[in-house]
């Protein structure tokens, strides 16, 4: 997850990635720590969610942007929250 406002990467990455046998050929893989996890949410903050899913050698990046509102979040792009099928 990335915070767009305030600007920072708040989600860590690579947790235990180096323990997977498939990653041995990449050499040194460093974990990125999670920062800002104790930052209280406030209206106007904006977050970009960028999860990735992999099936074998294929991957799909899905994501969206969410703004913290007074009473509820506002999802700016809802396309990726619905399952879309591809043929071919």
Image: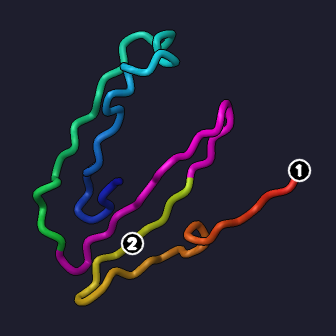
Type of secondary structure dominating the magenta stretch: strand
Q: Look at the numbered disc 1 and give the secondary structure of its residue.
A: loop
Left or right, residue 34 beside residue 80:
left
Which residue is nearer to you in this view: 15 or 67? 15
Is 32 drawn above or below residue 85 in the view shown? above
Residue that appears at 32% across and 69% down: 46
Which picture quadrant has residue 65?
Answer: bottom left
Measured along the vertical axis of the image, is residue 33 above or below residue 23? below
* 10 left or right of 53 in image: left
Where is residue 45? Give x, y as percent. Answer: 26, 71
Residue 46 lies in the magenta stretch: yes
Residue at left offset 17%, top offset 76%: 42
Question: Residue 80: percent from the left, percent from the top?
Answer: 58, 66
Label 2 secondary element: strand
The residue located at (29%, 29%) in the rendering is 31
The residue range painted magenta reads: 42-61
For disc 1, the marked residue is: 88
Please give the residue where the numbered disc 2 appears in the rendered image: 66
Instruction: Compare residues 46 and 27 and report the one nearer the observer.
Output: 27
Estimate how packed mark 1 is, as few (under 14), some (14 to 19) or many (20 or more) residues with alpha carbons within 10 Å: few
Dot 1 or dot 2: first in sequence order is 2
Q: Is residue 61 left or right of residue 35?
A: right
């Amino acid at each position: 997850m990335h915070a767009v406002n305030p600007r920072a990467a708040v989600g860590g990455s690579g947790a235990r990635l180096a323990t997977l046998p498939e990653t041995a050929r990449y050499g040194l893989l460093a974990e990125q720590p999670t920062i800002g996890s104790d930052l209280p949410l406030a209206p106007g903050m904006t977050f970009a969610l960028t999860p990735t899913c992999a099936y074998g050698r294929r991957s799909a990046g899905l994501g969206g942007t969410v703004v913290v509102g007074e009473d509820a979040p506002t999802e700016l792009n809802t396309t990726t929250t619905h399952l879309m099928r591809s043929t071919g």
